[in-house]
Image (cartoon, grey):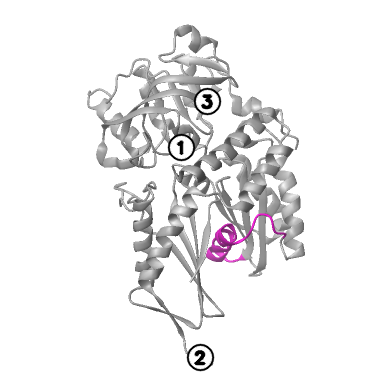
Amino acid sequence: MSGPRYIQAEEISSQVAELCGLACCRLPEDVLACLSRAEKEEKSPVGRKVLTMLLENAGLARRENIPLCQDCGTAVVWANLGQEALIRGGDFYQAISRGVALGYDKYYLRKSMAHPFSRANSNDNTPPIVHLSLVPGRSLALTLAPKGGGAENVSRLFMLAPALGREGVVKAVLDTVDQAGANPCPPLVVSLAVGGNMEDAALRAKKNLLLRSLTEPNPDPEAAVLEEELLAAVNRLGIGPAGLGGSVTCLRVLADIKACHIASLPLAVNLQCHAARHQTVVL
Amino acid sequence: MRKISLPFTLEELGGIRAGDWLSLSGVVYTARDEAHRRMTLALARGESLPFPAPDAVVYYTGPSPAPPRLIFGSAGPTSSYRMDPYTPALLAQGVKAFIGKGPRSPEVRQALVEHQALYLAAVGGAAALLSRAVREARIIAYPELGPEAVRRLRIEDMELVCINDARGGDWYVSGQNSWRSL
């Protein structure tokens, strides 16, 4: 066996800076594929018009290298660190933070982070929200998602009674999307995590938005069935693209099911606007 | 698509219906959360708004910074409900239309009818596309707020849809209801 592999903090900063620019200006292929399919399937003429505009917007942003959306989000970083890799030359979290500050400046991205009470802007979009997972291997995979405020504000965490069961979960997800209406910029990606506990449910719902492809089926058959059922039900709400009415309110449901305490039925519903931005780099 | 050159005439304000698409040209002012809080405090102190309020149009947006080669950064609408508490005061000053996204409170919808004003939506997330309609931009108040500063924009042919008209029509309700099948 060879020794650990070393990754320089400076390299992390420069890669994170590039991820910020890429993520804010380029819609990933899986999201584009979902939007194109939605444009064909949407039954409302107004809905189709909106979807055409969103596809044009994505093309323009990519060609001009400008942000898809003025809300360049909170920088959420999911780091899968190989257990045989070591970070050298500085603090890991500071390296990511520095990369975010560099990237948001370099690519003319909006700085949206402010003190909760004074609302004074930090002016460099720091702090990022960083989640670290230890995984087998020698590499570091960094995924960055600029998470906009509109969809995050209408996301919900429920600590349901176990008696409410699967039906209660379905109802809570539908209520969340229905009450959100036009605010989170539909068509949405709806990510739900059932089970675990309070913070675990919220984290898994977010993690799936960052790491799962919208065009790949869910490997868990129980979750896959729940995804299909919820997608059909959400699309019967009629909210439609931009909330102007239509048959496509949701592009994809991502579901994650896990064991929980005998007293609990935790549910996190993280809504994501159609600008489901995320980019990954492997060091 | 109906072409409108700002300011709105009384006839236009009364004739536009929820669900109508408009192509808007003229001057609009950007303001979002913190600018609204400050403007409302200024009004309470007896001061005036940082722009001429009569017939004004307010766009709820916080643009991304403009690269040197472009006139303006990406600038789509932000969720309007956060500005609901401040909106009746701006209507009382004479503001005639607001551009944003997402539903308004019952109080705002009622005040729009009372003041014969409109609530228009831009397509949320189409920020790069919407920035193309901006032909001139300058900061006129609260520069320290960065993206939340108040800006004077001259726009040409910005595509918008009327959500709340001056008669109480609400396109989020009527547009969605016709596709709802629960």
Mark 3 → mark 1, Cα distance in angstroms? 14 Å
Q: Which mark is residue B160?
A: 3
Q: Chain of mark 2?
A: A
Judged by depth in the image, the label closer to the viewer, 3 or 2, is 2
Chain identity of mark 3 = B
The residue indicated by pointer 2 is A2
Q: Is residue B11 magenta?
A: no
Look at label 3 and name its amino acid. Leu
Q: In the image, residue A118 lies at what x, y percent?
A: 29, 47
Viewer-nearest of discs 2 and 1: 2
Q: Nearer the viewer, mark 3 or mark 1?
A: 3
Q: Mark 2: which amino acid?
A: Ser
Q: Amino acid at mark 1?
A: Thr
* Label 1 CA crowd tier, 10 Å (few <14, some 14–19, many 20+): many
Majority secondary structure of magenta residues: helix
In this orientation, does residue A60 appear? yes
The vertical placement of B38 against A133, above or below, is above
Tell me the CA gap for discs 3 and 2. Answer: 61 Å
Mark 2 packing: few (<14 Cα in 10 Å), some, or many (20+)?
few
Point out residue A23 in the picture as x, y percentages from the top left corner.
49, 53
**Marks 2 and 1, how far apart in space?**
52 Å
Residue at the image position 52 percent from the left and 58 percent from the top: A279
Q: Which residues are magenta?
A: A196-217
Which SS class for mark 1?
A: loop
**Residue at image x 65%, y 36%?**
A240
